Amino acid sequence: MNEQIIARHWVAFAAPKAAPALATSTVLILGRIWNANGAEHSVGNAALMVVLATGAATAGAFAAAGQGGGDGVLAATAFATSGGLALAGVAGYADGLPLPLLLWVLATAVAYGIAARYWRTDRRDTVAYERQTTVRREDHAHIERVEMLRSRTQIEVARESVAYADALAAALTARATLPGFDPPALIRAGLPELPAADQ
């Protein structure tokens, strides 16, 4: 009810959506810089990237096949690292730009495909949390309304009791001042005993 409203900047919304393209573009640019600095047709550099990419893929496979289904985040990170190293190796080794660009497009599409799955899961969790929060707030608001009605009813009953007590006291006082009022005569007549006027 009294929540602080925080408006997120458009960059905060766009940054996660642009992250896969930025990551693959950065790898492509670094690979092309490496190509310009002597990696083109260098068998040693290509072998290094093959070994690193294979090692990262192997680590991802072991992480995915671990006990209890493995660690999904670690496996995804290892496979992403392997793909990035392979892209950087091709971008650095190839003499033309078409093959690195083709691999960049492919890597970006795969990265967006994987990220979309996590975005859907995150969105589903966020919507479920918001629904639970709304239901909880409605339950608490209902309890608040019931308690408010109960307290108002108790206050009204207390006011009516005070008003009745005041009216009874005024009636007893007025009855005691009436001429010819004789409580013992009323008792002798068989009426119930009345309380004394000073009570």
Image (tube, rainbow, N blue to C red):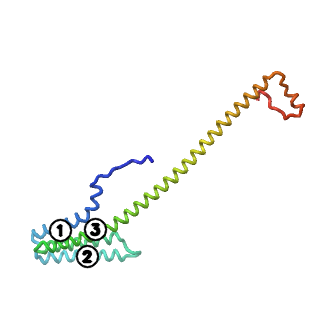
Q: Could you say which quadrant of the image residue 13 lies in? A: bottom left
Query: Around disc 1, counting alpha carbons within 10 Å, would you say few (fewer than 14), some (14 to 19), or many (20 or more)?
Result: many
Is residue 82 rendered to the left or right of residue 141?
left
Q: Earlier in the sequence, mark 2 or mark 1?
A: 1
Q: Earlier in the sequence, mark 1 or mark 3?
A: 1
Q: Residue 101: where, in percent of width, then height?
A: 17, 71
Query: Around disc 3, counting alpha carbons within 10 Å, would you say few (fewer than 14), some (14 to 19), or many (20 or more)?
Result: some
- Which kind of residue does numbered mark 2 sit on? Gly
Q: Which residue is mark 3?
A: 112
Mark 2: which secondary structure?
Answer: helix
Q: In whole angstroms, how far apart are the C-alphas of marks 2 and 1?
A: 20 Å
Please identify, in this view, whether the residue under mark 2 or under mark 1 is nearer the observer.
Answer: 1
Q: Residue at x 21, y 70 (%)?
A: 105
Residue furthest right in the image: 188
Q: Which residue is mark 2?
A: 55
Q: Residue 107: where, in percent of width, then height?
A: 23, 71
Q: Which residue is mark 1?
A: 28
Q: In whole angstroms, how far apart are the C-alphas of marks 3 and 2?
A: 24 Å
Q: Could you say which quadrant of the image residue 44 lies in? A: bottom left
Q: Residue at x 18, y 71 (%)?
A: 88
Q: Residue at x 67, y 33 (%)?
A: 163
Q: Residue 56: where, in percent of width, then height?
A: 26, 74
Mark 1: which secondary structure?
Answer: helix
Q: Earlier in the sequence, mark 3 or mark 2?
A: 2
Q: Nearer the viewer, residue 182 or 84?
A: 182
Is residue 87 rendered to the left or right of residue 39?
right
Where is 96 relative to 159, above or below?
below
Q: Quadrant of the C terminus?
A: top right
